[in-house]
Image (spheres, grey):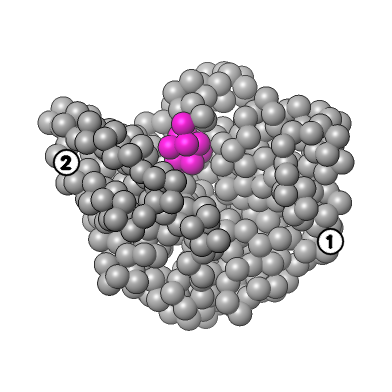
């Protein structure tokens, strides 16, 4: 039933919008009572939907308090003015290593997504109990469906899906965390290096079904259909504009800019600003930059520094990722670092469970404490919970780019036999090696100057 489609209605939006407004430093006191007075029916009528939409507009228009301590622009020039590019270490990549890096990044994204998908938004206690039931803790393999059945942990219909060790059936199932990466490849193939946010919008409407998007992406999709174009499409009636959706769409922009985090971040911006603002944009830019730097990096700390360098140093995301980096440098243990995220951004609040900042912190923790080991990195990012498939995919991309295809244990890849299913028109079933080859072709066609300058010829 259409009304039962998750995220189709705005019925869940008001609590999230209040939290989002408070995050942005807005005074919600005058409007909170009116929000609480909106009692929505189970059927959620058209009239109620419109009432919620009008309330979202009012919250968007609330002024920011004068003492708000952060400066968080959503325009690219404003972001550029607050970047710290001097923190990026220059590196070089031998051309003969490039395909292995790109292929490793694609494989890493798929593997991390598969590992995290069955336990998306589970608590870390529940994930540990399930993994221990399969003798897989700390995680070194995909989740065992037999352990899920025997543990009786409420999987329901998920047990019939193909995300478990024994149910991959020669292909990685379709998921938004990997489909968006394929769509970004199509955007570059179609529009080239100078693609615009309007090109991204057109690619979405031509290649992506509305019921395959959610949260900020669905809000943006609605806006595009109603001729609300970027960047307005990101803020109009969109309470999810700082959630993790833009970050999961950004990896490809890192793939095709090896060693150039600034270029990767700028491309991620042109995609992200269609559906996200502020830290929602910054998370996408940070992820793309980290992946680009991973192609030339000596280790995870350097990768994280590149991610920080492309986002405003006056933002909440910069502050929190800097805290994670300082914990690591001071010798704080992995689980103690994770517990600090739990304390500040409790997972039982959905706004935190799917927010860019909390999930970005967990990705960076996983990278730092993974210390360049692919298996350890994706396990580190899934075991805490939160948006586990998204985080697994992002951390997997970074780690896969860092170690290359040869640095990924074959057991992670052999079950899906080089095959990925997607929800993207014309690419519903693709070879992952073919995606890497297409990436190389795009890079050769439109990035030759950048590639020549970046790659060490010796």
- Tally of marks: 2
For image coordinates 33% across by 34% down, the residue present is 19
> Element at badge 2?
loop
Q: Main secondary structure of the magenta part?
A: helix
Left or right side of 358 for 318: left
Where 411 sits versus 354, above or below? below
Where 371 sits versus 401, above or below? above
> Element at badge 1?
loop
Q: Which mark is residue 169?
A: 1
Q: Can residue 338 be seen in this view?
A: yes
For image coordinates 81% across by 32% down, the residue present is 151
Q: Can you identify the residue that label 2 sits on?
A: 62
For image coordinates 70% across by 32% down, the residue present is 127
Q: Is residue 295 visible?
A: no
Residue 190 falls inside the magenta stretch: no
Residue 195 image position (x, y, % from top left): 39, 74
Q: Which mark is residue 398?
A: none
Residue 181 image position (x, y, % from top left): 56, 63
Where does the C terminus fall, quadrant-wise? Answer: bottom right
The residue carrying pointer 2 sits among few (fewer than 14), some (14 to 19) or many (20 or more) residues within 10 Å by Cα, namely some
Q: Give the range drawn in magenta.
A: 349-359
Q: In which quarter of the image is residue 267?
A: bottom left
Q: Earlier in the sequence, mark 2 or mark 1?
A: 2
Residue 169 image position (x, y, % from top left): 84, 61
């Amino acid at each position: 039933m259409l009304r039962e489609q998750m995220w189709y209605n705005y019925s869940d939006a008001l609590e999230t919008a209040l939290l989002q407004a408070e995050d942005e430093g807005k005074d919600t006191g005058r409007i909170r009572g009116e929000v609480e007075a909106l009692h929505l029916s189970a059927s959620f009528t058209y009239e109620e939907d419109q009432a919620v939409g009008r309330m979202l507009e009012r919250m968007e228009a609330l002024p920011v308090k004068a003492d708000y301590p952060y400066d968080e622009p959503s325009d690219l020039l404003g972001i550029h003015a607050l970047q710290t590019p001097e923190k990026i270490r220059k590196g070089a990549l031998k051309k003969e290593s490039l395909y292995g890096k790109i292929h490793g990044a694609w494989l890493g994204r798929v593997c991390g997504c598969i590992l995290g998908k069955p336990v998306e938004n589970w608590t870390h206690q529940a994930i540990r109990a399930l993994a221990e039931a399969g003798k897989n803790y700390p995680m070194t393999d995909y989740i065992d469906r037999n352990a899920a059945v025997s543990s009786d942990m409420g999987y329901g219909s998920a047990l019939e899906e193909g995300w478990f060790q024994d149910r991959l059936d020669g292909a990685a199932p379709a998921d938004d965390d990997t489909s968006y990466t394929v769509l970004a490849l199509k955007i570059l193939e179609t529009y080239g290096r100078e693609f615009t946010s309007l090109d991204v919008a057109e690619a979405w409407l031509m290649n992506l079904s509305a019921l395959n998007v959610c949260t900020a992406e669905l809000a943006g999709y609605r806006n595009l259909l109603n001729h609300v174009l970027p960047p307005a499409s990101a803020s109009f009636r969109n309470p999810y504009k700082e959630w993790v959706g833009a970050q999961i769409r950004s990896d490809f922009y890192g793939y095709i800019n090896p060693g150039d985090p600034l270029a990767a971040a700028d491309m991620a911006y042109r995609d992200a600003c269609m559906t996200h603002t502020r830290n929602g944009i910054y998370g996408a830019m940070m992820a793309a930059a980290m992946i680009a730097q991973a192609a030339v990096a000596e280790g995870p700390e350097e990768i994280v520094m590149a991610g920080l360098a492309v986002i405003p140093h006056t933002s909440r995301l910069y502050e929190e990722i800097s805290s994670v980096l300082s914990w690591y440098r001071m010798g704080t243990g992995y689980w103690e670092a994770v517990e600090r995220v739990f304390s500040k951004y409790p997972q039982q609040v959905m706004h935190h469970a799917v927010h860019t900042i909390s999930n970005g912190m967990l990705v960076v923790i996983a990278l730092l404490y993974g210390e360049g080991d692919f298996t350890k990195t994706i396990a580190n990012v899934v075991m805490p919970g939160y948006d586990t498939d998204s985080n697994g995919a992002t951390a997997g991309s970074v780690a896969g780019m860092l170690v290359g295809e040869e640095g990924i244990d074959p057991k992670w890849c052999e079950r899906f036999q080089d095959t990925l299913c997607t929800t993207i028109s014309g690419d519903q079933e693709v070879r992952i090696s073919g995606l890497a080859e297409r990436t190389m072709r795009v890079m050769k066609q439109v990035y030759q100057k950048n590639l020549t300058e970046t790659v060490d010829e010796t």
